[in-house]
Amino acid sequence: MNRRHIFGQVFGLESIIAGVVFLVILGMVFFSVARRRARPGIAASHRANRPKLEKCYVVVLAAIAAFLVAYTAWQNHREQQTAQQSPVRVNVTAFQWCWKFSYPQASKPVSTTSNCRGDKLPTLVVPTGRTIQVTVTSRDVIHSLWVPALRYKMDAFPDHKNTFTITMDREGRWIGRCAEFCGERHAEMHFWFKAVSPEKYSKWLAAQSAGHTAGAAA
């Protein structure tokens, strides 16, 4: 997922820099305490400041801060470029005890569903590199759309719509589950979340629009 990947890069780098600065300062404190303290035959220093050394501190810290600001701004620009594209919209309807995925932007109405029994699981298909706007609702009781491997979860309420966005940066297929106890077959209410290339997604959507509106895979 592109946005999460960008956040991970920025946060990881900032954590490393913060850790290095902390260790350097901690080392200097220990050095000062261990080597520069007063002891028999050596008087404690009465110098109140060291201008040259303090200027070096300021320059180094200012350079680190400027680098972090510039790096974060650049990463945010990358994220905004992705967000500026028109999102791919997917409507998710949960029901006892399975899922229906609808694609309102298709040339003809497209939806995929199943009964969630055995291997008959519906597949939520999305393209990589695009912002995906997922709208979640329920037909009956409270459910919860959950893809554990991607760390995405959104509750599905009757007569209410929740929306979240996601951007996939790689192709793959991950199992999805219902994370809210919803009745007798709650434990079997699974689905597939599948990310494919934009080219494969366009072909799949065109094929579904042509008449195969109950398919489960791309």
Image (cartoon, rainbow, N blue to C red):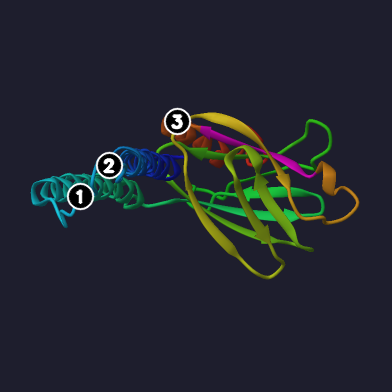
Estimate the spatial distance between the alpha carbons at disc 2 and disc 3, rounded to whole Å: 63 Å
- Mark 3 vs mark 1, foreground winner is 1
Total marks placed: 3
Q: Secondary structure at mark 3?
A: loop
Considering depth in this image, is 210 or 53 the residue closer to the camera? 53
Instruction: State the residue in front, 216 or 70.
Output: 70
Q: Position of residue 43 (x, y in %)?
A: 23, 47
Three-letter amino acid code at the position of disc 2: Arg
Dominant secondary-structure state across the stretch colored magenta? strand
Residue 218 shows in this picture:
no
Residue 95 falls left or right of residue 154: right
Q: Which residue is mark 2?
A: 36
Whether the residues at callouts 2 and 1 have beta carbons within 8 Å, the answer is yes
Q: Amino acid at mark 3?
A: Ser
Q: Which region is colored magenta?
A: 189-195
User: What's the distance in space between the residues labelled 3 and 1, CA to CA?
Assistant: 67 Å
Residue displayed at 67% across by 59% down: 155
Indicate which disc, 2 or 3, sits on the residue closer to the N terminus. 2
Pointer 3 local density, CA inside 10 Å: few below 14, some 14–19, many at least 20: some
Q: Amino acid at mark 1?
A: Ser
Find out whether the residues at labels 3 and 1 contact each other: C-beta distance under 8 Å: no
State which mark lies toward you, 2 or 3.
Answer: 2
Residue that badge 3 annotates: 197
